[in-house]
C-alpha cells in the first residue's frame, strides 16, 4: 500500500502535465479550431478511455458478425506494431509484421469483408472508399482519441474491474484522456462483467456512472469457446471437453489483461501454470523452447498449451517451434454476450443507424 501511494505522488505531477496537453487538444477540437471530418459513409468508432485491456477486438468482431449479413462492411485499424507504412488492405496471407496482430486476426476470421490499416484514419477512410466504393459501413477500431474523424456513432468500452470513473490519467493510471470526455460517446459498454452479477449490482453501477441522457449503457461478458488447435492437424486427437478436468495447462499470453481467461481455466482445468508476456509481445522460438523444463516438468502425460486467438496469430509466424509445443498448442476463442437481455436493443440501435445513413456513402466526400 505504501509503495503504491508513493508511486502515485511521484507520478501525479506528470499526470497533471499529460492532462493539460490532452485537455488543450480536446478544447481545440471542441471549439472548431482543429477540424474534425465527418465522412459520408456510416462510421462506427469502437474505442476506450483507458490503455488496452477492455476487449475491443471481440466487440469489433461482434459488430462485424452483426452487420455483414446486411451491409458491405470494412474495418479500419492502426495496425499496431506493424512494420509497413501508410494504407494497406489486409488479407489472411499477410504476416503480423505487415498488418499487426489484431487486423490479421480479423482478416483470418472474416475473409469476406475489407480489413484495412492506416495510422491516418481520415486517409484510411478515403482509401477504403476509393478502392472499395461498394463499402456501406466502416468500423473504426480504437479510434476514440482520433478527433480528426467525427464518427456517426462512438462506442466506448470500460473494463468492469477497472472502470474509467475509478481511474486516473497516465502515468498514474491508465486513462488516455480525462474521464469527463466520455460525453463524446453514444454508447458505453461495461465489458468483462462477471456473468453472475445481480440486477441490483448493475443498477448501482448504472447510478455511479451517471451517463448523459443521450447515451445508452450496456453490460457485456466474455463467453469462451472450445479449444482450437493453433496448428491444425498436429494436436493429438483427444476429447478435450472430457479431458480438461484431468489436464494440466500451460497458459501463455501476450495480451493486456489475461485475468478473465486465467479465471475461466482455473474453474475448468486440473491445474494451470501461467506465463505472461507484455501485450503484443513478439514471441521467439528460443523463448518458447526455454519454457518446457521450467514449467511442465511436473505435468502429467495429459497436458495442453493454451493461448489466446490474438497470441496464436503471432505464434503461427514463428519458424522452428519445438514439436512438443506444436502438438499441444490450442487457442481459446472468445465472444461477447450482452447481459440484462439488452442484445436486441443494442443490435437495433446499430443497424438502424447504418440503415438510415448508408445512402450517403454513394456521394463522394
Image (spheres, helix red, strand yellow):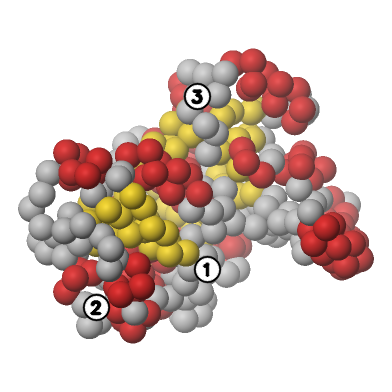
* Comes first in the chain, label 1 or label 2: 1
Q: Looking at the image, tell me whether mark 2 or mark 3 is earlier in sequence order.
A: 3
Q: Is residue 292 visible?
A: yes
Q: Residues within 10 Å of mark 1 (few under 14, many from 20)?
A: few
Image-based side of 125 in relation to 228, left or right: right
Q: Residues within 10 Å of mark 3 (few under 14, many from 20)?
A: few
Secondary element under disc 1, as helix, strand or loop, is loop
Whether residues under marks 2 and 3 lie with C-beta atoms below 8 angstroms apart, the answer is no
Query: Residue 107: where, in percent of width, then height?
Result: 33, 59
Separation of disc 1 and disc 2 at Cα? 20 Å
The residue located at (64%, 21%) in the rendering is 201
Residue where numbered disc 3 is placed? 196
Left or right for 98, reference 199:
left
What residue is pinned by disc 2?
321
Residue at mark 1: 278
Q: Secondary structure at mark 2?
A: loop
* Quadrant including the C terminus: bottom right
> Which of these two is toward me, 119 or 289?
289
Judge whether 156 appears above or below 96 on screen.
Answer: above
Pointer 1 and pointer 3: residues touching (CB < 8 Å)? no
- Tell me the quarter of the picture where residue 216 sits: top right
Left or right of residue 152: residue 237: left
Real-space Cα distance between discs 2 and 3? 40 Å
Amino acid at each position: 500500500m505504501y509503495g503504491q501511494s508513493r508511486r502515485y505522488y511521484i507520478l501525479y505531477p506528470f499526470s497533471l502535465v499529460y492532462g493539460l496537453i490532452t485537455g488543450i487538444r480536446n478544447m481545440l477540437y471542441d471549439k472548431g479550431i482543429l477540424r474534425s471530418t465527418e465522412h459520408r459513409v456510416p462510421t462506427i468508432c469502437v474505442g476506450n478511455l483507458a490503455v488496452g485491456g477492455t476487449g475491443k477486438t471481440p466487440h469489433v468482431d461482434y459488430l462485424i458478425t452483426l452487420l455483414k449479413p446486411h451491409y458491405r462492411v470494412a474495418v479500419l485499424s492502426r495496425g499496431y506494431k506493424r512494420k509497413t507504412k501508410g494504407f494497406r488492405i489486409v488479407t489472411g496471407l499477410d504476416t503480423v509484421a505487415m498488418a499487426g496482430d489484431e487486423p490479421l486476426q480479423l482478416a483470418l476470421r472474416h475473409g469476406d469483408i475489407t480489413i484495412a490499416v492506416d495510422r491516418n484514419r481520415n486517409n484510411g477512410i478515403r482509401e477504403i472508399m476509393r478502392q472499395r466504393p461498394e463499402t456501406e459501413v466502416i468500423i473504426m477500431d480504437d479510434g476514440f482519441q482520433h478527433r480528426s474523424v467525427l464518427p456517426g456513432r462512438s462506442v466506448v468500452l470500460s473494463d468492469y474491474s477497472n472502470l474509467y470513473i475509478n481511474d486516473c490519467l497516465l502515468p498514474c493510471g491508465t486513462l488516455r484522456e480525462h474521464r469527463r470526455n466520455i460525453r463524446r460517446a453514444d454508447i458505453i459498454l461495461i465489458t468483462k462483467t462477471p456473468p453472475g452479477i445481480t440486477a441490483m449490482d448493475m443498477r448501482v453501477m448504472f447510478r455511479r456512472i451517471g451517463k448523459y441522457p443521450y447515451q445508452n449503457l450496456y453490460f457485456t461478458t466474455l463467453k469462451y469457446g472450445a479449444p482450437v488447435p493453433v496448428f491444425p492437424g498436429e494436436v493429438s486427437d483427444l476429447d478435450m471437453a472430457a479431458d480438461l478436468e484431468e489436464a494440466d495447462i500451460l497458459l501463455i499470453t501476450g495480451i493486456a489483461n489475461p485475468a478473465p481467461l486465467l479465471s475461466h481455466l482455473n474453474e475448468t482445468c486440473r491445474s494451470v501454470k501461467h506465463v505472461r508476456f507484455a501485450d503484443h509481445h513478439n514471441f521467439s522460438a528460443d523463448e518458447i523452447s526455454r519454457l518446457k523444463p521450467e514449467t511442465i516438468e511436473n505435468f502429467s502425460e495429459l497436458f495442453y498449451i493454451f493461448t489466446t486467438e490474438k497470441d496464436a496469430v503471432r505464434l503461427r509466424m514463428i519458424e522452428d517451434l519445438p514439436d512438443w509445443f506444436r502438438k499441444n498448442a490450442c487457442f481459446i476463442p472468445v465472444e461477447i454476450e450482452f447481459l440484462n437481455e439488452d442484445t436486441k436493443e443494442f443490435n437495433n440501435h446499430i443497424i438502424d443507424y447504418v440503415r438510415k445513413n448508408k445512402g450517403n456513402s454513394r456521394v463522394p466526400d
